[in-house]
Image (cartoon, rainbow, N blue to C red):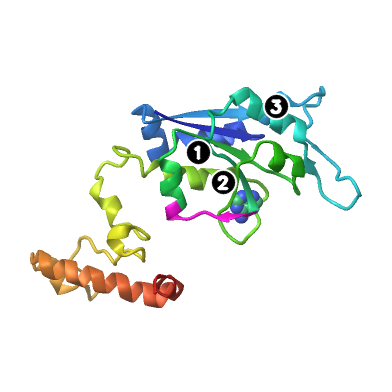
Amino acid sequence: MMKINVITIFPDVMENILSMGMLGVASKKSLVTYNVVNLRDFAKDKHRTVDDEPYGGGGGMIMMVTPIVEAVEHIEPSQDSPVILLSPAGERFDQSLAHRYASCEELTFICGRYKGVDERVRKMVVTEEVSIGDFVLSGGELAAGACIEAIVRLKDEVLGNEDTRDTDSFEKDRDYILDCAYYTRPEEYRGHRVPEVLVSGNHKEIEKWRKMSSLRRTEKLRPDLLKRKS
Ligand code: ADE
């Protein structure tokens, strides 16, 4: 069973995210186990402080090295398992990174807060740094939640209908581009009809249409994906 550790100052938020929808189902099915660790349990003072002012001055608070390192030591992540710091400076998270993490037995996420973490955290415990995009969040919790959801849904048996996953956007069966357009009932709504081919029952033609739809949407919405491929 995959083990996912999360170090955070908002354990309740994280527990909530991890009990939601598919993430909750995955743990109920014992496909994954979550271990949420409250960083404040590793603070050294009665106020449970985990941040301090930066040496050299300037604004903002920096997360202290001591509680983070000791929280990781408490978890004792298995050897060579990724210890991931969520930060805007990290490698961009994407579907291929989700696949790599989904093949790991154990993952440890450190949710940063405030202005950043003491640089020694990177040196002492972090093995990789991940960002979910070029924007700045106030903390890593939502970023960790997004990454964990993308990873856990790749585990076999997590999704009810597994073969829908193969045709997701960014997956091999979609040529690593966007998924196609979909329609469901009714067949006509206020004059807008479902493309005829989709109700034709001709599976070969439907598959051809879906490939075209996927390509057209990608050209329109994410042309960078096509450039990256060629
Ligand atoms: N923490 C703050 N901003 C972040 C981002 N863009 N990605 C991951 N973690 C973050």
Q: Is residue 92 magenta?
A: yes
Residue 111 quadrant? top right
- 207 to 124, vertically: above or below: below
Residue found at x 23% / y 76%: 191
Tell me whether the residue at label 3 lies in contact with that at label 2, contact meaning CB atoms closer than 8 angstroms. no
- Foreground pick, 88 / 20: 88
Residue of label 2:
142
Q: Is residue 15 left or right of residue 48?
A: left
Q: Which mark is residue 70?
A: 3
Decide which of tag 1 and tag 3 comes sooner along the chain: 1
Tell me whether the residue at label 1 lies in contact with that at label 3, contact meaning CB atoms closer than 8 angstroms. no
Q: Which mark is residue 206?
A: none
Q: Real-space Cα distance between discs 3 and 2?
A: 23 Å
Count residues near mark 1 (Cα–Cα under 10 Å), then give few for <14, some for 14-19, many for 20+: some
Q: Position of residue 145 (x, y in %)?
A: 52, 43
Mark 3 C-beta to ligand 1 under 8 Å: no
Residue found at x 65% / y 46%: 139
The amino acid type, in three-letter code, at marker 2 is: Leu
Q: Position of residue 134 (x, y in %)?
A: 61, 62
Q: Which mark is residue 17?
A: 1
Disc nearest the viewer among 3 and 2: 3
Q: Which residues are magenta?
A: 89-96
Image quadrant in which the N terminus is located: top left
Q: Position of residue 66 (x, y in %)?
A: 76, 31
Decide which of tag 3 and tag 2 comes sooner along the chain: 3
Count residues near mark 3 (Cα–Cα under 10 Å), then give few for <14, some for 14-19, many for 20+: some
- 106 to 161, vertically: above or below: above
Image quadrant in which the C terminus is located: bottom left
